[in-house]
Amino acid sequence: MGRVNFRDIRREERLLGGKRIPVAVLPRLSRNAGVWSAARSLLRSMRLTLHYLVRPSTVATRQYPENRATLKFPERYRAVLRLVEEEGCHRCAAACRLCEKSCPNGSIKVISRMGAISGKVELDRYIWRQDSCTLCNACIQACPFGALEMRPDFENAVYDRRLLIYTLNRYAGPPASVLHKEENPEARRKMMEPRDRYGGPVPANGYFLPNVPPLGGAPGPDAAAMDPVAGKGEPA
Amino acid sequence: MTVRIRTLEEIVRPPQTADSPFSTQEYFVNMGPQHPIAHGSLRLVLLLDGETVRRVIPAPGYVHRGIEKMAESLTYRQIVHLTDRMDYLSALMNNWALSKTVEEAGGIATNPRIETIRTLMAELQRVQSHILWWGVLGMDLGAFTAFLYAFRDREIIGEIFEDTIGARLTMNYIQPGGLMFDVHPDFARKVKKLIVYLRTILDEYDTLLSGNAILQERLRNIGVLTPEKALALGCTGPVLRASGVPYDLRKAEPYGVYDQVEFDVVIGSRGDCWDRYYARIEEIRQSLRILEQLIDNIPPGPTMVTKFAERIKIPEGAYYGQMETARGVLGVFLVSDGRADTPYRIHFRSPNFNNLWAITALAPGWRIADLIAIQSSLDLVIPDIDR
Amino acid sequence: MSGSLLWMTTSAAQASPWAVKTLTDRAAEALPSSPWLTLAYLAGSLAALGALVSFLGMSLIYVERKLAAHFQCRLGPMRVGPHGLLQTVADSIKLLLKEDIVPERADRAMHLLAPFLSMSATVLALAVLPYSPSLQIADVNIGALYITAVGGLGVMGTLLAGWSSNNKWSLIGAMRAAAQIISYEVSATLALLVVVLFAGTLSLSGIVQSQAAGWWIWRAPGVGIVAFTIYLIASTAETNRTPFDIPEGESELTAGFHTEYSGLRFSFFFLAEFINVFVVSAMAATLFLGGWMPFRVGGLDGLNAVMGLLPPGGWFLLKTCGVVFLLMWSRWTFPRLRVDQLMRLEWKFLLPVGFVNLAAAALLVLWNLYFFP
């Protein structure tokens, strides 16, 4: 009576709910055929681990940060959100807030203003909360102008979590499509009002805590309203 | 967080009569939520008699995040990224389950390219999930090396996902209406290389663990689950199939392009831990078969049939969609009250929830070490139990 | 007290050229009977012992980590020092600086005592190992028996630790450990007795010197290799290593009997385990692989000259490291046995095989049916 190997799998057909289903039936595992076959199986597994021991080329570890020079992440890897820049100009055309609405947990806050020179609604501040963003890509899908992208720059660790809420745009003003039409660099610069990274009415930026000084830059005009403790602003 | 389990009071009673010369006292231990190599935050209250388990009372809920409640205030597209986080090892399949239900309910028809790529991704994810399960089983049973080998091989699939999807674990890729991106140009080449590589690796897995006499003795004839009991408990997936019931949703109610590919449903003959173990390894081989058949035959076409800004309107009513994840049948029960884009209620029928309660039926009478083996062979992912 | 060579006087193929002089002999000769100098010597030897134990433990832990890493296709410690050589030093400093916790309702005295028991059992065994003809701390004329007896002390530490922790998981681990260690001591002793039969002496240096004509693993035909295998399996179980590491089965019992220990006293358990590995490997090398005897083939003078280039201490180290490698190799490959499978393996398989082996060895010795009797 031959002993069935655990890899002898029978192909059959079974009937279930009126359908014929091709099945692969596993054999019943039989008791080990004795000391020698058990010992041989143990020795075979030892040979496999020895195989990996004596071949240092099979090591799968990549030593970070020593390999930063050659480290390449796939282009589509989602690590951080950025505004697409075309020669220093962003593409947020209308501050339409479609991205803000599509974000499942409110990690985006778009503040718009009326452009003084262009007369249209423009982007003032694009505030992104890296501490709550789940990198789900919904904002990028939602934007009709392709203003957002996910970059694979993953080295974003900070020591202070207030630094994880910041403004993505470097200037408040019209998008690239409008600015590139303007030939005069002086006029162009007049339309772009620079924006710092950590200022503005960012909820929880500065965390108005009794003994904690607010983060760099004065709080913006709506800061008091945004204060979750004192004001009646949005919860952090 | 204390969980009051009323049944404990009934159980804890001083032993009335000693029916053996040695009157042993049964005692309670918590295989608690904090455990170095537990599968997640699952609390198991064990009633032990020496080394023998008399009763297992699972107390889940430590990873409850209120996904179903959150879903009541999100749009369908936003709920998809939450489904990633349920059974995170079958994230793409979870996405697909919800997308499928929404599409069927809302009358959105996809095209063959979308369905083929969805099937490919789901099978890749199934392979990845089973490889990780194998490594964790090895580690639970003491063979730590298996874990590292599994992760090394899982990396390759992770890199394939990274190229196309941009994420390795929380994918959010399969959306109602199609896919988030088209496949990367390197996708087919890498998958073909992977299939060849994995076939040799599966032999290595067999050498390291499956053929190992110690492992076979640890798993053979332990925790036998009869088909009737499995069906009564509502177990699905490899747990049910190892007991001999050839129920695989991919064959029973085909979706995607599963009805156009040939593969076998793997069933076991005894329903013990070994059958559950080897059924999954054989399932990896069957998944590789499916991948092989599909990888060169992806039909052309767009990968998104609806616009992102389009609101999904589902008529009022209750809908149910289900599919086969790596662990069993994931069902999505959707109640819509006619509002656009947001459900009234979503409930997920999670496979791990039913598989978990199989422990209460299987473990009593066995030793602690067998309990570990049984729990490993059931392949539980705790966040899916709690959602 | 000194290594007396009164054993078999029959025509040995080569009389042993090695004369054993132990450290206690040297101390007895060199020390005048001044109490202060004795005290100084005592203090110095304690320091030396501490240094030896720490150095041995740290090196073994480092080797284990590196070996484990390379078995698992990864690199292991690489950052602290070149290729992570100082990693265990950093870990030791960390452990020393950790808070020493005694659980609230634990039996405090026992909890504090247990690691010392484990450690002392290990250190006592280090005293009689024959590292080289000139480097043996003491040569007790019942060396093999002494090692077995002292090894039994270690289980006391485990039991005390598990009981005094006031933790059900630790208790389960301790009970398993006690059952396992006591059972496998029997098999280990039976395998050891085979060599004692052949060598005719219990003294460890005597056993080494009896292997001048050849190592017992092959010189005792058949029974040698069987005894070696049994000794290795039993030693793996004695030292709580996979596949017999259920007392500290991490996936089940958190950390088994030493769950509630932290800081220095945890490091005692940790070091004790690794030095135990060293001790059993050294015993296996001494008993079966010739100890510090170099590899010699009678007649091939050229080969013998080359082999003689490595000093005997180096040979001992080489053989011990070989056995340590075997133990580590099997640790990182096999899953663990369940407690009843483990007991069944010992009582129903290893013990009968050990008895039959011993009887066969006795017959071989009686009828001189071994090589170079």
Image: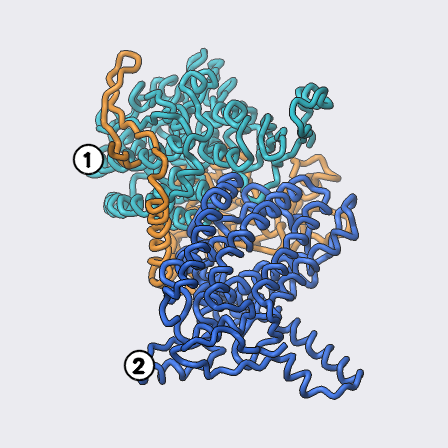
Q: Residue C339 location in percent, x, y?
A: 53, 41
Vertical side of C331 occupied by B221: above or below: above
Near mark 1 (Cα within 10 A), the count class, few <14, some 14-19 or many ≥20, is few
Do the residues under discs 2 and 1 have CB atoms within 8 angstroms? Answer: no
Which chain: blue?
A: C
Q: Which residue is mark 1?
A: B297
Q: Are marks 2 and 1 on the same chain?
A: no
Vertical side of B195 occupied by C371: above or below: below
Which chain: cyan?
A: B
* Apparent colour of chain A: orange
Q: How is the image coloured?
A: by chain
Q: Residue A34 location in percent, x, y?
A: 35, 42
Q: Could you tell me which secondary element the residue under label 1 belongs to?
A: loop
Dot 1: chain letter: B
The residue at 53%/30% (across/down) is: B366
Q: Residue B56 location in percent, x, y?
A: 58, 27
Q: What's the CA distance linking mark 2 and mark 1? A: 72 Å
Nearer-the-camera pick, B245 or C224: C224
Q: Residue C232 location in percent, x, y?
A: 47, 57
Identity of the amino acid at label 1?
Answer: Asn
Q: Could you tell me which secondary element the residue under label 2 belongs to?
A: loop
Identity of the amino acid at label 2?
Answer: Gly
Disc tally is 2
Q: Which residue is mark 2?
A: C299
